[in-house]
Image (spheres, rainbow, N blue to C red):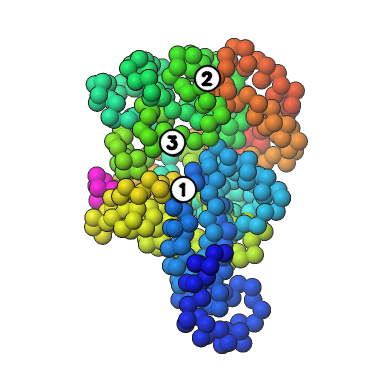
Amino acid sequence: MSKSKKKWLLPLTLLLSASMLLSACGGNKESAGNGGGTAEKPVELIWYTIGTPQKDVDKVEEEINKYTAEKIGVTVDMKMIDFGDYNQKMQVMAASGEPMDILFTSSWAFDYVQNARKGAFMEMDELIESHGQGIKDAIDPAFLEGSKVDGHNYAIPANKELPAQEAWRFNKTLLDKYNLDISNVKSMESLEPLLKTIKEKEPNVVPLALSKDFGPLLPFDYIIEKMPMAVYLDDKEDLKVVNFLEMPETMDMLKLMNKYYKAGYISPEAATTTSTQDLMTSGNWFADRAATQPFADNLWSQSYGYPVVSTPAGDATIFNWSVMGSMQAISANSKYPEKAMEFLNLLNTDVYLRNLVDSGIEGVHYKKLSENVMENLPESKNYDMPTFALGNVMLTYLNPEDPENKWEEFKKFNESGQPAPLLGFNFDPTKVSTELAAVNNVKEEFWAPLMTGTVNPEEFLPKANQKLKAAGLDKIIAEAQSQIDAWKASK
């Protein structure tokens, strides 16, 4: 811990009360700090979260710790890992017993369900009751209920949009410059005329910005995100499990992606790019795809400092992965689980802390225009955090263009989502763990090149499917089908 942090970690009032605390607190390892800074020394929590590491994290962390040390006797050491690296690095660190207290998990990064079942996360039921009551009042009950694994909570979901809806995003400056119309854009195919225009007229702009974790929109509900087992979205009755890589829709889409890659609409480095943040910062992109929410255009425009507009790429659907799309877990190895839950409770209920973590320091990274409206300052480029990944989104300040009823509209949006066929089903991999590991290793060889259009699917997809079968994919599909049949019968 730096000397500068120690200056405020041990204020005079704490030093004066140290002798009293030593005699009163005994040997409780979590006695440090409890409401109002009555402890000798705050507990430091190690917090791993997802997102492109930001220049001003340490500066903001110092302000966070001034506040949380006084409030709950806690400081945090924030460690950011970029989107494309998060899953692999967290798997390695969790397996090696790397010290950590709080960590981001989800259906798509450091898989929540699988790692909960492996014992990586602490069961939270009692912790929520004893140290997280504010969370129960603040979060839509559907998140806590829908994210249970075998009847228990192992992480706190972000209170955000409940359905998943994808949108095509556009750099509005370029739309306006070439008078391009997006009113009829929805499918990947419908993008082509716009991408062609940008490729011809803006040689320094990436027409379609992708990173290696991109996946084309296909009509499937996946049993495990980014693994080749799924049921069709319109299959509400049979729930037949398929290898979606063998389905004709997949081949057609991957051929289109390859066509776009060959045409130069996609960056040659897409399959190895971990983040497109540099393109967003520079504005040298035209289109990409992102999960949307009510008034998302305002959020993106404020974040990037130039206008961004979007149009839906799919319907609003409630998947397991959207309920579990952003969560904070407590490591099973945490020395301070009660303090970790106290911090998560504060993060999800305290307006000041939530906005400090999200938007940085008032007067440095943003300025307030009113009680609950903010505007980014130029320095915000040094602290541009993924809002969805950091707790209760509905505590964040509004952007200048947002209506006052933004959060009421969020609630309406949440109520509008249609359930996916596998909503509520969580696959138990115990019987096929060896095969799953082998299939995942095979998948890592070809997934990003295929999904980003970097390779010819007519050549590579058959090879991939052959390797997947050899690794045990058919056994996994049979086990998944058996579990889904039992789940369906129990409903």
Tell me which segment is drawn in magenta: 399-405
The type of residue carrying mark 2 is Gly
Mark 1: few/some/many CA within 10 Å (<14, 14-19, 20+): some
Asked whether residue 263 is drawn in magenta, I would say no
Position of the N terminus, as image quadrant, is: bottom right
Compare marks 2 and 1 and give the one earlier in the sequence.
1
Secondary structure under the numbered disc 3 in the rendered image: helix
For the point 55% across and 37% down, the residue is: 84
Tell me: residue 275, above or below residue 204. below
Query: Could you tell me how far apart the alpha carbons at marks 1 and 3 are, in whole angstroms?
Result: 12 Å
| Figure quadrant of residue 206 | top left
Residue 422 visible, this angle: no
Tell me: residue 283, above or below residue 8. above
Task: State the residue position of label 2.
Answer: 453
Query: Could you tell me how far apart the alpha carbons at marks 2 and 3 are, in whole angstroms?
Result: 21 Å
Chief SS of the magenta region: loop
The type of residue carrying mark 1 is Gln
Q: Give yes or no for contact between labels 1 and 3 (Cβ–Cβ under 8 Å).
A: no
Q: Position of residue 2 (x, y in %)?
A: 54, 64
Q: Is 285 positioned to the left or the right of 92 in the image?
A: left
Q: Position of residue 85 (x, y in %)?
A: 58, 40
| Figure quadrant of residue 340 | bottom right
Task: State the residue position of label 3.
Answer: 278
